[in-house]
Image (cartoon, rainbow, N blue to C red):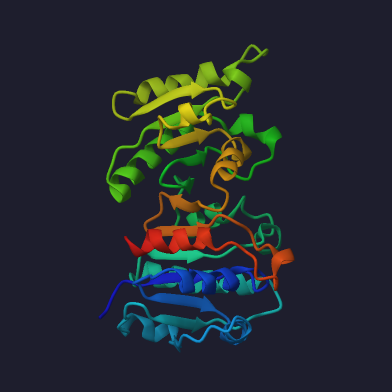
Amino acid sequence: MSSNPILIVPGEKRSVFFEIFFKSLRSKFFSSPLILICDKKNLDKELRKHNFNKNIEQIKLDKAFSKKFYKKKIYVIDVKFQASNNYVHNCFKVAFKLIKKGLTYKMINGPINKTRTLKKKYLGITEFVAKNFKQNQFAMLIYNKKLSVCPVTTHLPIKLVAKKITKKKVKEKIIIINDFYKKFLGFKPRIAVVGLNPHCESVLEFNEDIKIISPVIKSLESKINVKGPFAADTIFLKNNRNKFDIIVGMYHDQVLTPIKTIFEYDAINITLGLPFLRVTPDHGPNEKMIGKNISNPISLIRSLEFLDKK
């Protein structure tokens, strides 16, 4: 029976991805066809290493568009490994081509070494993917069905954050989040927005919470269920966070630190604002854990579950 496949770019050759990938498939049933885009020689090595015996069918890129994909099957498109950093980029190029030509609208990528692979050209994979689809308005959502977070700025040095907090950007993120929840999750989310400054107060004459964030929230309150700004040090207390589906922060660690403390690996990274669904497990390559067989697969399981239902 033919079904819409999930594209999977495993990412760095040296990472724990295949360990958690095989663990995920052993522990959970997924009905969608899966298409791995990677070096087949390395994949075969990982199959033997992890004693994973499921048959994986190799397909050619140019044959993919006429191919019937069947539920519960795994396929691979071979992208030869290169010593340079072009390998990961080449895997993404194949995935992007398949998406742009309409093969599917679902994609997962494994962990990427941002410094090595992106070479400081992008703040992160979120920006890299958005740029390749010419999307200027996008957002990074760290999603758990109980509570999610979204930083207005992503992998930006702290000293640059305040300069990037604008009415336009804050408003843009809130609207993108609201639209995503309504379209893909079927409900209007309860959104909390935190302030930039401690306790939303500032000893400086210009207070971003009063001059930028608060006016944006007031302008959207009649159309979107959004409140704030709240102090970042108390919004994640249980009685406070339970009132919301998503908390929007001004910078990366302001909201990612508490969400990872609460849920640990039980969250996924979703790029909002793209013409397709791009999801990634919320962890890095973790090279120090390679070969130990103790990495937690829950984030990849949640990624597969999310797309399997869409």
Compared with residue 156, is residue 82 higher up or lower down, i.e. above or below? below
Residue found 25% across the figure and 81% down from its top = 1
Q: Is residue 171 left or right of residue 50?
A: left
Residue found 66% across the figure and 58% down from its top = 114
Specify whether residue 11 is in view. no
Compared with residue 49, is residue 229 higher up or lower down, i.e. above or below? above
Farthest residue, direction right: 288
Q: Is residue 231 left or right of residue 156?
A: left
Residue found 58% across the figure and 87% down from its top = 44
Q: Judge by depth and name the residue closer to the eye, 86 or 279.
A: 279
Compared with residue 299, is residue 208 higher up or lower down, i.e. above or below? above
Position in image of residue 177 (x %, y %): 39, 41
Farthest residue, direction left: 1
Position in image of residue 158 (x %, y %): 69, 35
Specify whether residue 50 is in view. yes
Q: Residue 260 is drawn in which quadrant? A: top right
Q: Residue 97 is drawn in which quadrant? A: bottom left
Name the quarter where the C terminus is drawn: bottom left
Position in image of residue 39 (x %, y %): 58, 82
Position in image of residue 13 (x %, y %): 65, 74
Q: How many marks?
A: 0
